[in-house]
Amino acid sequence: MNVNQSAPPVPPFGQPQPIYPGYHQSGYGGQPGSTAPPTPYGAYNGPVPGYQQTPPQGMSRAPPSSGAPASTTQAPCAQPTYGQFGQGDVQNGPSSTVQMQRLPGSQPFGSPLAPVVSQPAVLQPYGPPPTSAQVTTQLAGMQISGAVAPAPPTSGLGYGPPTSLASASGSFPNSGLYGSYPQGQAPPIGQAQGYLGVQTPQRSAPSQASSFTPPASGGPRMPSVTGPLLPGQGFGGPPVSQPNHVSSPSPQALPPGTQMTGPPGPPPPMHSPQQPGYQLQQNGSFGPARGPQPNYGSPYPGAATFGSQPGPPQPLPPKRLDPDAIPSPIQVIEDDRNNRGTEPFVTGVRGQVPPLVTTNFLVKDQGNASPRYIRCTSYNIPCTSDMVPLAAVIKPLARLPPEEASPYVVDHGESGPLRCNRCKAYMCPFMQFIEGGRRFQCCFCSCINDVPPQYFQHLDHTGKRVDAYDRPELSLGSYEFLATVDYCKNNKFPSPPAFIFMIDVSYNAIRTGLVRLLCEELKSLLDFLPREGGAEESAIRVGFVTYNKVLHFYNVKSSLAQPQMMVVSDVADMFVPLLDGFLVNVNESRAVITSLLDQIPEMFADTRETETVFAPVIQAGMEALKAAECAGKLFLFHTSLPMAEAPGKLKNRDDRKLINTDKEKTLFQPQTGAYQTLAKECVAQGCCVDLFLFPNQYVDVATLSVVPQLTGGSVYKYACFQVENDQERFLSDLRRDVQKVVGFDAVMRVRTSTGIRAVDFFGAFYMSNTTDVELAGLDGDKTVTVEFKHDDRLNEESGALLQCALLYTSCAGQRRLRIHNLALNCCTQLADLYRNCETDTLINYMAKFAYRGVLSNPVKAVRDTLITQCAQILACYRKNCASPSSAGQLILPECMKLLPVYLNCVLKSDVLQPGAEVTTDDRAYVRQLVTSMDVAETNVFFYPRLLPLTKSPIESTTEPPAVRASEERLSNGDVYLLENGLNLFLWVGASVQQGVVQSLFSVSSFSQITSGLSVLPVLDNPLSKKVRDLIDSLRAQRSRYMKLIVVKQEDKLEMLFKHFLVEDKSLSGGASYVDFLCHMHKEIRQLLS
Ligand SMILES: [Zn+2]
């Protein structure tokens, strides 16, 4: 009786389940029909889909390269305080003239801890002495690596030399775009590789433009509509007179669609009556919502007409394509908010398209998983066609708003959860009980199973079990089962997980103040480790390691008066020098831990050690968890390229000359296979790695992020970290990360009903076979995108089912299964597919597909593939679903009318088309971030939100309506906020009223505003408060802290800001929205002809 009964939507669930003997419980991941014993933790020797590139190189503890020190090809941070390192020709070591900061009073610290300063550093008196192998002599003294001067830039690519970049960047804010180095913003010179760089001039020739028909003038087949439009009318589209707006829904209206007379018309909609209103915005035309439109000229030859229904051609003078006439993301978002944000989304009906991710709505689980857990690219799958990628973006542990209940936990006792004998699917609302309730037919594989006696229940006259609404697994889309010991590693219930904090104490980490800041913060943060339910204290144990090129372990056993340090300097053969006292309960060892955290900054205050190791640190943490027989998480705080002699040693191989060559992919690949090998070991141990990077220059994020990526961890990057500028952002991220609820040692399997199957997976995880997604850790922010393909014909009657099962260990050490079910419709008419698509989810899938593609393909090929795929999707619609019309018309399905604009944003993103200011590390960083993003995150990341601040009344408490991300939409008399989930800008127009300037910045004129400011002064006036509240609210919506950058119009920083005005042509050659739409139209026409 372990059912959580808080706020039950239905009568109490889950009576205690008697044990029913003889029900053999196969392990997780058993194959259909398999009688072999489960092997839930098979050998990790399978393919690694997420990282196909560099083949594993065995235990690449190979001797490190003996070559010369890597050259620096990137400018380090050019900041006044870093002056001594700022010339791009010195590695990040201290110069001999630098006075190291040392706090007064830190000298004698009467602890047993010895300072470690690049000396043979094994402290004898503490703990068991290390074996002689570990007592190695360290390199004496410090070295400033003999870096060579940066390579000159190639002439063709337009990238300035690092030194010049650095020198041009004096006033750049520290955070850059992704916390990148504040380098120059000079526009690239010769980088017009995109198709539009060449074609735009042609398009703008007015003489080549053709005329348009009015987009919404009512085509021959479109009945004129007055009053609320019935879904399915005419083309199933919106009213002609208001194509872009959805009028008030008429819930009762659901007649089948007006028959199309032309071939191949769409069939009547298959929606159920429970989707009031939504049909109205489907499968129609786009265009301005202001009634009949004038004609739109286009600069493109043979250009498009925008409208779902062709009207008679009306020759008109050519004009530039009116941006107001092309589909507006803002309008679509607003319409959905207005129409679907008021009523809860009830999941009881198969194939319902949920509201957009940008709409606030509540969910009521009535048998299908909430869209917070699963979103699909389409909710109506063609019975045979794979034309539109079918993918689900799954966030198994998504956090819910307080109004929505967490999944119920069902305990079936020793027998464990009830499953299909053949396909191992878990009991769910779609299983069909037959023979009076004595058997059930599996909804996934059709196998007939006996119902165990203790689970037996009578059926009512509709064939439904009479207890269906008393059991979560028979009535809800999402729920949890308590797992039995069969689901545990080595058939043993798990121990509570552990957190290990591993702190770089090399010169860079000390100098920036990072170590001191971190140690101070940890003292209080350890009180907020994740807890389960109402537990008084967290079950999680903690441990501490510091390192530079050797590792220091700490014994913080509660019985000690002072912490003890043990040094392991043989990093080639890492071991954990102590077991007892390394992982401890925070409350029991508080005094010792506090003492340790006080001492660490002092101990290393005088360090001159600049070299670091990296792989041995992870190895050590993983070995410690293994020794303690538990899963857990490593928090690594790391500053530099690990160049010390050790496994996983890296060299600086950054080379921007590779951009736009066939070798560009190597910039995204790890430079050694050692980290993949290490990651596999970590996954086997349930060791998740979160990495906090504080680089001054290139650190090879592509390689360092391999282990976090494959273990379900997170990477944070704070380039040129300085305490005064960056502590708020770092501490905010750290607090959130440490407090996150995490599922450990997890395995996820997605089962499908006959006809489709999961074929591909995207995210931060590891796979050793083709079906099981292994996650050393999984938190509530991480998603896994799963692609499905047909392997048989689907059936319209039965639809298609997905079941995602996540087996994991909770923060308290409880083994559980979380189940999410989702039923989709199936259709024989493609029009139904296009009426039930979710473009935001499709973009999430396409971006992840492309971002993985750059690991193995030239970036240009990846871009071309995206364009072709998008054109095929839209051409298929045009061919099969749209009514015949003049070839000059571009007709987009209503649900996909934003596909071109969003796709263009993906194409011109930094990974696929980097600007000059984007570093190799930035690109690798963003690439791996996007891999785990949910749909809401990719949506705002690719199409940022731009909010005018002074347009709406000051007393208005709601978020101001966004405007389109284009310079045209900026008024120089206004102030705007722009955010994309990672970056936050406040743009101030040059003509903004003096009163506004005074209210926000407390200065008297625009010219006095400090460009690059990252904090607004706290002023006691309504505008200041409103803007600061809005900033807080935006930050609260995102999973990472967004540092503010104030940008003044016409200031050089504005270049950074304009990078995010994604509807405009970009400096790196990315097309404007208008140009891209024209290009897409051309592609579609080519496919059709
Ligand atoms: Zn089955």
Image: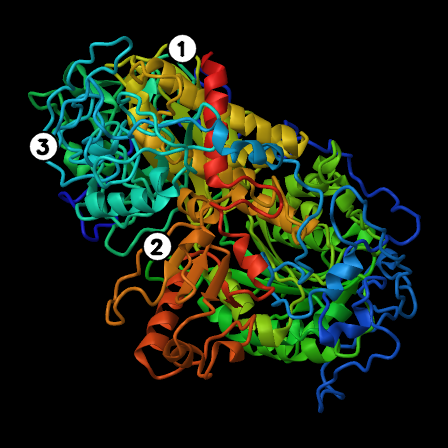
Q: Earlier in the sequence, mark 3 or mark 2?
A: 3
Residue 543 rendering spot, x and y as whole percentages: 61, 63
Question: Which circle marks residue 962 in the picture?
Answer: 2
Q: Earlier in the sequence, mark 1 or mark 2?
A: 1
Q: Residues within 10 Å of mark 2 (few under 14, many from 20)?
A: many
The residue positioned farthest toward the bottom in the image shown: 105
Horizontally, is 1043 left or right of 950 in the view? right
The answer as to whether callout 3 falls within 8 Å of ligand 1 is no
Residue 867 rendering spot, x and y as whole percentages: 52, 28
Q: Give the foreground label among 3 and 1.
A: 3
- Give the Cα separation between the discs numbered 3 and 1: 44 Å
- Give the Cα separation between the discs numbered 1 and 2: 44 Å
Mark 3 belongs to which amino acid? Answer: Thr
Q: Quadrant of residue 82?
A: bottom right
In what element is the residue under mark 3?
Answer: loop
> Which of 580 and 583 lies nearest the eye of the viewer?
583
Locate ligand 1 by image quadrant: top left
Residue 28 in sight from this viewpoint? no
Mark 2 belongs to which amino acid? Answer: Ala
In what element is the residue under mark 2?
Answer: loop
In what element is the residue under mark 1?
Answer: loop
- Give the Cα separation between the discs numbered 3 and 2: 30 Å
* Residue corresponding to mark 1: 792
Mark 1 belongs to which amino acid? Answer: Asp
Residue 624 rendering spot, x and y as whole percentages: 65, 54
* Residue corresponding to mark 3: 226
Q: Earlier in the sequence, mark 3 or mark 1?
A: 3
Residue 358 in sight from this viewpoint? yes
Q: Is residue 1054 above or below residue 900?
A: below
